[in-house]
Amino acid sequence: MNDTDRPCPPFGWLFLGMLTLATATATPAGAASPQSPPYASEKPLPTPRRLTAGGVNTRHDDAHVTFTPDGRQLYFVRSTPDFENWTVLTSRFVNGRWSEPELAPFSGRWSDADVSFSSDGRRLFFISNRPVGDGPPREDTDLWVMDREGEGWGRPRHLTELSSPGFDWFPSLTRNGTLYFGSERPGGKGKSDLWRAEWKGDRFGPPENLGDVINTADQEVEAYVSPDESFLVFAAKGRPEGKGAYDLFVTYRCGGKWTPPLPLGAGVNSPAWEFGPRISPDGRYLFFTSNRSDYAKSPPRARTTAELERELSSPGNGLRDVYQVDVQALGLRPPCTR
């Protein structure tokens, strides 16, 4: 088999070396390895389970988890129920446990969301409606970045070269510095498209639309790109293969072109909203957000007041929660050439 005949690598392929190392040092079945990252599950996750780390998943609207490259700090978004304001919170794994979430130092005043990191952990990207300079707060969101300074972060910098008159969403960075993001900017195929911008050494180049294999007349909003730019997992609305409003799809970059997207399996998609995909730093897990509900519309008997309060004040109450599933359980291996 030569290079032109080789099938496109399966989802998560670039992390197989890490997975081999993890399984080689595994402890007895059902127990997490001492080398496992603190977000690791003690049991296999063949179907999605709500994340239990870092104080995420409460009676509030919690979404969009991102881990630092070392896996020992997470950031997530807590929104008002009407989705009009978003705040970034963070939790650290210290002395064997996750700390209580607290406001991220750069958040708490404006609407901020969608944190992501460069592969070396030296840059933090996010979106915000905060003012640019002395201007008023924006009606939409733009892309921002901060550089690591010691144990903290420098001042947020507006990515002026990527600014648009529409909402910009969910930055995700490749190893070579190319930034992927969703945007409602003019020139797209639909209301919201996926775009990429290459790093030119001191700034990002002009954004490029990913084209009509991925983008449609409806909405493609959030994409996780693999570090080597070989695949995307993204949220989209209005596709015939979907199950609900927004669903998650995967596409592979083979021969410089993107393959037709396929919906994720393993129970990831549902009639509810699924979005905010991120792969864990070790490549073992997919984290995503969903507003799927545990609330029974027709219980076998009438609820008591205490039962109603408990259900409405718990995760699964119809607001957004974060879910975790094994990457290997997704089982997507579309044929393609490189």
Image: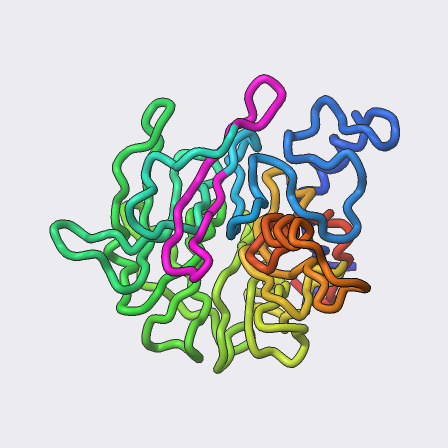
**Most common secondary structure along the magenta stretch:** strand
Please determine whether, in this image, residue 67 is positioned above or below residue 34: below
Is residue 78 shown in magenta? Answer: yes
**In this image, 184 relative to 289: left or right?**
left
**Residue 224: x and y, percent?**
54, 55
State the quadrant of the N terminus. bottom right
What residue do we see at 69% from left, 35% from top? 40
Q: Is residue 251 visible?
A: no
- The number of numbered discs placed on residues in the rendered structure image is 0
What residue do we see at 61% from left, 42% from top? 280
Which quadrant would residue 156 be assigned to in this image?
A: top left
Magenta residue span: 75-99
In the image, 59 versus 158, the foreground residue is 59
Is residue 37 shown in magenta? Answer: no
What residue do we see at 42% from left, 70% from top? 209
Colouring used for the render = rainbow
**Residue 265: x and y, percent?**
74, 62
What residue do we see at 45% from left, 41% from top? 118
State the quadrant of the C terminus. bottom right
**Residue 180: x and y, percent?**
45, 57
Please determine whether, in this image, residue 78 is positioned above or below residue 146: below
Q: Is residue 269 visible?
A: yes
**In this image, 178 relative to 16: left or right?**
left
**In this image, 272 relative to 109: left or right?**
right
In the image, 167 versus 159, the foreground residue is 167
Farthest residue in the right direction?
29
Farthest residue in the top direction?
95
**Residue 214: x and y, percent?**
54, 72
